[in-house]
Image: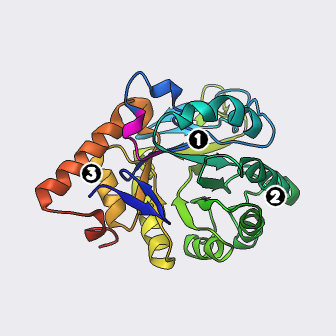
Amino acid sequence: MMKVDLCGIELKNPVIAASGTFGFGREFEEYIDLSLLGGISTKGLTLEAREGNPGIRSFETPAGMMNSIGLQNPSVEVFMRHELPYMESLHTEIIANVGGSKIEDYVQSVTLLENTSIRIIELNISCPNVKEGGMAFGIKCETAYQVVSAVRKATRKKLMVKLSPNAENIRAMAASCVEAGADMLSLGNTFNALAIDIKKRKPVFNNITAGLSGPCIKPIALRMVREAAKEVDVPVIGLGGIMNWQDAIEFIMAGAAAVQVGTANFTDPTVMLKIIRGIEQFMHDEGIKDLSEIRGII
């Protein structure tokens, strides 16, 4: 059975489009039937609209890519008015990815989303905390606990916390977020990395460092997903360099309840359907009736 239960919410399969790589779905509707996906995590939403970072925003690296988008988005309110009605017509689970620069921003954003049809909030705690000198909320357990607990009090929806792989201790971070009220975790976000233009003798990105994703990070993300899944007793959604169905199966065997696919969508807009079909065929060939039979066996 391909169905997945995430804290009482049933997905038709374990394949979700990762935030920031799939927009709000419109860009991909001419390539695939979006209703076949397990879910779509929206582009990162903030309380106020953001234009994003200046300069180069994406850069290809060996076996991956770097991005410095800067959470460009139309704001939560505009999303609710103009994008959500379209997404509701797609017949797949819609997950609202929410970011912010202050705890108050997160709280106000989820409060606005409270009366919508969305059932899962994905909290992006890799955002810089302006009150703490710009260090991401997801680096230290104490700061992560503060933002997750504040948001927990503000919403009745299921809360998925997206962990930063740059956290000081991923096991402790997972435990801290669950203690603060996370119903589930997703892991991980992009890795902080550096690219240099040797002709210009300066960093490629205006912000100096940027987020690294793609197949180059998969072995590290896989290890972190296993560690988090062993540490906490809530669903962990795995992501990081998943390019095909074999990668997805690896994450499930490491303990992932479901997976998110990101960078691969840029190289093949039909890749998620191929992953779904591949998992289905693997289960048939191996005599696996339910993914729970192989989940977390490593």
Chain-order first, disc 2 or disc 1? 1
Q: Which residue is mark 2?
A: 103
> Residues in magenta?
34-39
In this view, the mark in front (1 or 3): 1
Looking at the rendered structure, the kind of residue marked 3 is Gln
Is residue 36 on the magenta stretch? yes
Is residue 232 on the magenta stretch? no
Placement of the C terminus among the 4 image quadrants: bottom left
Res 72 visible? no
Q: Residues within 10 Å of mark 1 (few under 14, many from 20)?
A: many
Residue 42: which disc?
A: 1
In this view, the mark in front (3 or 2): 2
Measured in 3D between alpha carbons, the distance from the residue under mark 3 to the one under mark 2, in whole angstroms, is: 38 Å
Chain-order first, disc 1 or disc 3? 1
For the residue labelled by badge 3, is the local secondary structure a helix, a strand or a loop?
helix
User: Quick one: which residue is furthest to the top in this view?
Assistant: 30
Q: For the point 41% across and 57% down, which residue is it?
A: 258
Looking at the rendered structure, the kind of residue marked 1 is Thr
Horizontal and vertical percent for residue 125? 68, 57
Q: For the point 43% across and 57% down, which residue is it?
A: 10
Residue 246: which disc?
A: 3
Looking at the rendered structure, the kind of residue marked 2 is Ile
